[in-house]
Image (cartoon, rainbow, N blue to C red):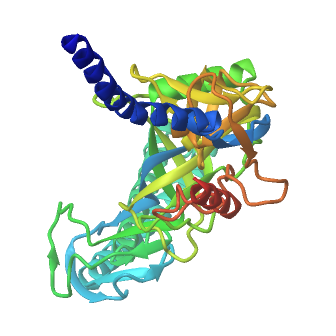
Amino acid sequence: MTRTLSARTLSVIRAPRRATAALPAALLLLALGACNPKQAAAPTPPVPEVGFVTVTPQAIPYLRDLPGRVAPMRIAEVRSRVSGLVVKRLFEQGSQVKEGDILYKIDPAPFQVDLASAEAVLARHEAALVLARQQADRLEQLLSRATASQAQYDAAFAGKKQAEAEVAGAKAARDRAQLNLGWTDVRAPITGRIGRALLTEGTLIEPGSTGALATIQQLDPIYVDITQSVGELNRLRRDLASGELARLEENTANVHLIMDDNSLYPLAGRLLFSDVTADPSTGQVTLRVQFPNPHDELFPGMYVRARIKQGIDSDAIAVPQQAIQRTEDGRAEVWVVRADDTVMRQPVEVGPVVGQNWLIREGLKGGEKVVIDGVQKITAGATVKPLDQTPAHGEAGPRHDADEAPDAPGAKNAGDPAEAAQRAAAAQRH
């Protein structure tokens, strides 16, 4: 009996301890049940905002920036046609000279003597001709009266002809002496800008000398020789033949120059022709362009970039450069916003860069919305909040025309001011 009471007593004593141990667990379950289910769930991420432009077919000139070198329209070396001592230089080095201006004087005294001698020989032969004609006329009259033989008349007639030939030869010698005397005045063969003098007074020009006295270059108008690959030129010709590109009007100014400081040369040039022979080492052909150069801003040998308009794509589609993405294998693609505000990848074939845009040859059509901002925040099939960043009519947009100045260094990715403001606001929201 004593043992039974002891066991019951022990069970009564231990029961409060178990109840006390279970109390914290019950309180924890009660606290969890009182929590809000919405607060326990993970927060839903916001819908990403993306900027897009609506592509529209438009007439865009086919432009190419090609390297080129300035070359004079005409170049002539001033040379002396006679030998002698240079006694005077009559031009200012680096000045503009006109065709026929006297540049150098060569000592004329020896040539004056030669002319006087030739004139004396001519006078002697002319006197002999007078005598021969008189003799022939006299014997002709005697022959008609049968008082002279035919042989005598034939000899007199032949003597007259010989005297006439000698007079003609003497006149030629006199004319040659006059030419040599005139050539002592070394004249400018063309109009242009003359370079430095290569000879000075007192220099003796020896017979047979081929050295140049100076060089004259015609700089207004002036040529620019630019190079283009054969493949690109042939593709352009095929596009023009198929009608994909429209031809420019004849004699139009379709080339502009970009100087080494990235400024635009103020006067446009006209494409004259393309060479018919390709350089075997580079596979390129030369295109020659003529530019006005009234202020001598272009110098022969200058390196320039020529922005050439070779055709017009009347229904071209262009997108900003930042819209073009590249896959791992290098293929071009863009993100397109669909009608349900989801995005998808769209492979495209790009053409040349025109201004700040890529020309799209295949893959897009008018009216599609191409993402240009917020690409890093989207995945294929994701729902987005599209923001229209298409430049309104009349606002500053991407430039296509070659007549406009090129972009300054660092300004290529600056973008439109309204677009920059929208990007800044989106960055602050996120």
Q: Residue furthest right?
A: 393
Nearer the observer, 36 or 247: 36
Q: Is residue 144 above or below residue 260?
A: above
Q: Is residue 415 above or below residue 110?
A: above
Nearer the observer, 235 or 224: 235
In percent of width and height, residue 334 lies at: 59, 29
In percent of width and height, residue 123 lies at: 41, 73
Q: Can you see residue 69?
A: yes
Q: Residue at x 76, y 25 (%)?
A: 365
**Total numbered badges shown on the rendered structure:** 0
Q: Residue at x 43, y 44 (%)?
A: 155
Q: Residue at x 37, y 34 (%)?
A: 20
Nearer the observer, 401 or 412: 412
Q: Is residue 157 left or right of residue 253?
A: left
Q: Can you see residue 139?
A: no
Which quadrant of the view contains residue 47?
Answer: top right
In percent of width and height, residue 292 lies at: 60, 65
The quarter of the picture where the N terminus appears is top left
Q: Is residue 175 left or right of residue 264?
A: left
Q: Residue at x 42, y 83 (%)?
A: 95
